[in-house]
Amino acid sequence: MRLRGGAGRRRAASVAVGERGSPAAPPAAVPYNAPSMSGFVRGVGGGWACDGVPLAAVAAEVGTPVYVYSAAVIRERVRRFRAGFEPWPHAVHYALKANSNLAVVEVVRAAGGLVDANSGGEIEVALRAGFAPGDIVFTGVGKTPAEIDRAVELGVKAINAESAGELERIAGAARRRGTTARVALRVNPDIAADSHPHISTGLSRHKFGVAIGDARAIVREASGRAGLRFTGLHIHVGSQMLGLGPLRRAAASVVDLARELAGDGVKLEHLDLGGGLGIAYDEAGGEQPPPVGDYAAVLVEAVRPTGLTLLVEPGRAIVGPAGVLLASVVDVKPRADGTWFVVLDAGMSELMRPALYGAYHRIALVEEREADPVTCDVVGPICESSDVFGVERRLPLPAVGEPIAVFDAGAYGSAMASNYNRHPLPAEVMVDASAWRVVRRRQTMDEQLAGEVAAPRGSAPREPAR
Ligand SMILES: Cc1ncc(COP(=O)(O)O)c(C=O)c1O
């Protein structure tokens, strides 16, 4: 297989899927990011490992860029969510948009999580991972007729409708199939998430849901319509939230609406309060998400007076800290001011968050060592000036070819990867109980080009090359 030029792609990337024993692991010494709880630790020799598997070994064997996930961390985080909500009837619907790698989704299922799908594609992934239609809530601001029809055909637990028009289209699809679709209405409570503007979704200027002031009339009207069974209300005000205030206010507003609807004779089954719990990306401790138990207690308290089942849709808080992106250094360039550019073989095509939101990710040499650090910008190879993973980072100057770890990349990392600059979609590895396997091999050039054909042959003569 031909690889994109550069020493950084350490090895041919198309590694057969298969179980491998782990090389001897250095003893776990320094847990990083304690608030988030993670299976990635630095051994006494300085090398980072995931649940006993040295990351350097994975990078050497599979090549880079590669995502590495800890199954144990995913399981533990699902368990914490379930335990947090335990005192109240609830379901934890993992938001597939954060990471829908089949192996990741299977681990979530085995841990007792259900799913929130945001597209027809994510519904199919959920089914292939072994979920039943009744385990799936279907969200999405722009559902196509085919997606609606598929969700109706399957009989998912709830289609979270985004508008009065969409409710009508769902009812139409259900009537054509001679069935009744279970629906919830996504409500926009006009509440600021106090998060990054691009991942805030609950203000009236955002495209999501119907204005809370319009919701009562819409539900009353739609709940009498043939083809619809109205089961709930849905909100999601934003992502990477570090305070509970916005969630408390959003929950209160939807609880008020549920009470009004109960007074109107509309019998709901659940309130779906979305996802949004943040994680600690920042090693300096600037970002301190509330513990899952506190988060759950706030939501349960809000919902209690209604007696309704509580659904939540966490994504990032389940898989974010469970993944790292490993990349290799392809160049180190000195700058006039004494700082450096460290250029990696992975960039915004593999991990878009820094370019998209200016997001911060911790970065370390996979084999950390005692050496005077230099100040460097850690950048990707993509032809965009926004393709920067970290600015003014302090690292020992890495050698070309050396692996680098970008932490907390399990959510919205591989899920947002693209073929920009014709990068192949990266490989993904899962570690479980000190064994690991490639759970998605790196895309080949043939796979990337499989759907493309030659240009049509017009009658225009071919221009001579200049
Ligand atoms: C409707 C909905 N539910 C759940 C989520 C998951 O959010 P998070 O990953 O912040 O938990 C999102 C994220 O955008 C969303 O839009």
Image: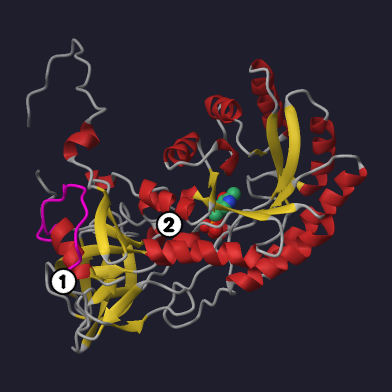
Q: Does 131 appear above or below 40?
A: above
Residue 333 shown in magenta: no
For residue 400, say whether it is visible.
yes
| Residue 368 percent across, percent down from the top left | 22, 81
Q: Amino acid at mark 2?
A: Leu
Measure the alpha-carbon separation of dots 2 and 1: 25 Å
Colour scheme of this structure image? secondary structure
Q: For the residue marked with disc 1, what is the amino acid? A: Lys
Q: Residue at x 57, y 33 (%)?
A: 143
Which residue is pictured at 44% across the width and 60% down the height? 319
Q: Earlier in the sequence, mark 2 or mark 1?
A: 1
Q: Which residues are magenta?
A: 6-23
Closest to the camera, between mark 2 and mark 1, is: 2
The C terminus lies in which quarter of the figure? top left
Q: Position of residue 17 (x, y in %)?
A: 21, 48
Please indicate, yes or no, whether residue 426 appears anywhere in the rendered image: no
Report which residue position mark 1 lands on: 333
Q: Is residue 182 left or right of residue 358?
A: right
